[in-house]
Image: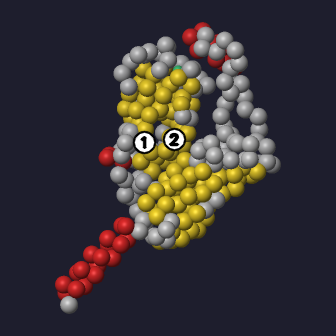
Amino acid sequence: MKKFLAILSLLALVLQIGCAGDITGVITLKGTPPGERELTPIRDTAECSAMYPGALPKTKFYVVGAGGELADVIVYLKGVPSASTGASAAPVVLDQKGCLYTPQILAVQTGQKVIVKNSDPCVHNVHTKPAANPEVNQVQMSGGADLTFTFDKPEPFLKFQCDVHPWMFAWVSVFDHPYFGVSGADGKFTIKNVPPGKYTLEAAHRKLGVQSAEIEVKAEGAAQNFTFEVK
Ligand SMILES: [Cu+2]
């Protein structure tokens, strides 16, 4: 009987791992967001200005498609136990190119490497402005070695800035579990391999705040859309 129970619990475990599903959805923005600002201070800096003989780039606070598809929304499970796999996860790359950070919105796990590159012909300095993690400030010359950052504590929208070029920002959300995704240009997000169960799912946009939904993930996964609104 004991052996039978042991086999049964092992089978249940295998089934549970095998049945982890994906959470998918689409983020939509209703209404017209405020216009983006042209980054005019670029003209004050010869080395950056030279890269833009024509129009200057603009802020990217609201990245919205023609049908309201909203990018750069971080979607994640709230209140799940700490279970970071960051140490073995593939690094995420944050590039400095055209005197801008690319991408500007990222998400990583605690312990996961953020590799910062300098693809520009000028010097940058990479300065983090965290709330929960230690502050770091490092100069990176043109053609200099990549810098590597890791974060021990979860926190939303940890700011990266360049003090040489005060319009350069990126925001990195840090989680202590792997259950998050970032919406793309099509507004879609995916959170992979979530064990079946009931969860609180949150969607956070840096300018539009946080929305929440109660969901149940089954073996085949779950679907949940979010709509943000600007008045
Ligand atoms: Cu810079």
Residue 96: percent from the left, percent from the top? Answer: 50, 25
Circle number at residue 98: none
In this figure, which colouring scheme has been used for the structure? Answer: secondary structure
**Does the closest atom of ligand 1 sit within 8 Å of the Cβ of label 2?**
no
Is the N terminus in the top left, top right, bottom left or bottom right quadrant? bottom left
The answer to which of 39 and 133 lies nearer the viewer is 39
Vertical relation: 130 (above or below) 141: below
Ligand 1 closer than 8 Å to the CB at disc 1? no
- Residue at the far bottom in the pictured view: 1
Residue at (64, 59) in percent of width and height: 225
Mark 2 residue type: Leu
Q: Nearer the viewer, residue 67 or 150?
A: 67
Q: Position of residue 101 (x, y in %)?
A: 54, 29
Q: Residue shown at 56%/58% (left/top)?
A: 24
Residue type at mark 1 is: Asn
Label 2, label 1: how many angstroms apart (C-alpha)? 16 Å
Q: Position of residue 32 (x, y in %)?
A: 79, 43
Rendered image quadrant of residue 145? top left
Q: x and y percent of residue 35 in the render?
A: 76, 34
Q: Secondary structure at mark 2?
A: strand
Q: Which residue is mark 2?
A: 106
How many labels, in total? 2
Q: Secondary structure at mark 1?
A: loop
Q: Residues within 10 Å of mark 2 (few under 14, many from 20)?
A: many
Residue pictured at 71% horizontal, 18% vertical? 55
Q: Mark 2 vs mark 1: which is more N-terminal? A: 2
Looking at the image, which residue is at 37% across and 53% down?
A: 84
Query: Between 56 and 45, which is closer to the camera in this rendering?
Result: 56
Task: Give the left or right position of residue 230, taking residue 221 as reference.
Answer: right
Mark 1 sits on what residue?
A: 133
